[in-house]
Amino acid sequence: RLTVDAAISRQPEDIIDRVRERMRADAIGRVVIIQLGTNGIPSAADLRDLLIDLGDRDRVVLVNVQSPVSWMDQSNRAINAAALGLDHVAVADWAAEARGHGEYFEADGTHLTDSGRSAYVRLIEASLRR
């Protein structure tokens, strides 16, 4: 069973809060995939606290950012810092995977085409096996 909890333009702090709400409600799976940072820079400390609290999960995958936003590198640094040293966490490096693949993106450089969605899914699947 798969549950997707997504919203347009959700900010990083709202994503972290939403994951915590789902944890309190016991409505979160053994595997958790989180993508944040496109709509703002996540707090590395807040994200790390969340990841530590998710330490009882089988796997947490954090997907980093590839987008023409000015804060992309800052978001990706925060994601990498938050995950550092946590064995249950894998960072799916979408920035590296998508670099040079303009065909993955719509004209806005953020939203994905069919080929971009396929590549995104393959990256997450590979991250789940690490």
Image (cartoon, helix red, strand yellow):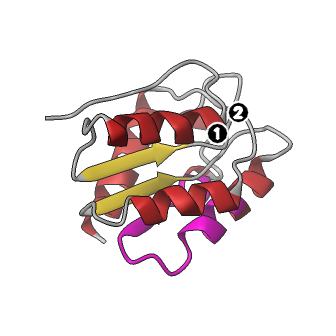
97 versus 17 height, above or below: below
Residue 39: mark in rendering: 2
Instruction: Find numbered disc 2 in the image and state the secondary structure of the residue it sits on.
Output: loop
Range of the magenta residues? 78-97
Asked if the residue at tag 1 contacts the one at tag 2, i.e. Cβ–Cβ closer than 8 Å, the answer is yes
Residue at 47% across / 61% down in the picture?
Answer: 51
**Residue 1 in the image, given as x and y percentages of width and height:** 13, 35
**Residue 80 in the image, given as x and y percentages of width and height:** 62, 67
**Which dot, 2 or 1, sits closer to the camera?**
1
Quarter in which the C terminus is drawn: bottom left
127 versus 8 height, above or below: below
Q: Is 101 on the left or on the right of 86, as rendered?
A: right
Instruction: Find numbered disc 1 in the image and state the secondary structure of the residue it sits on.
Output: helix
- Tag 2: Cα neighbours inside 10 Å, few (<14), some, or many (≥20)? some
- Tag 1: Cα neighbours inside 10 Å, few (<14), some, or many (≥20)? many
Q: Nearer the viewer, residue 127 or 59?
A: 59
Residue at 70% across / 33% down in the picture?
Answer: 39
Residue at 78% across / 38% down in the picture?
Answer: 68
Residue 12: mark in rendering: 1
**Residue 20 in the image, given as x and y percentages of width and height:** 45, 42
Look at the image and say whether residue 49 sits in the magenta stretch. Answer: no
Kindly report the distance in space between the C-alpha atoms of the residues bearing marks 2 and 1. Answer: 7 Å
Residue 12 lies in what quarter of the image? top right
Task: Tell me the amino acid under the disc marked 1.
Answer: Pro
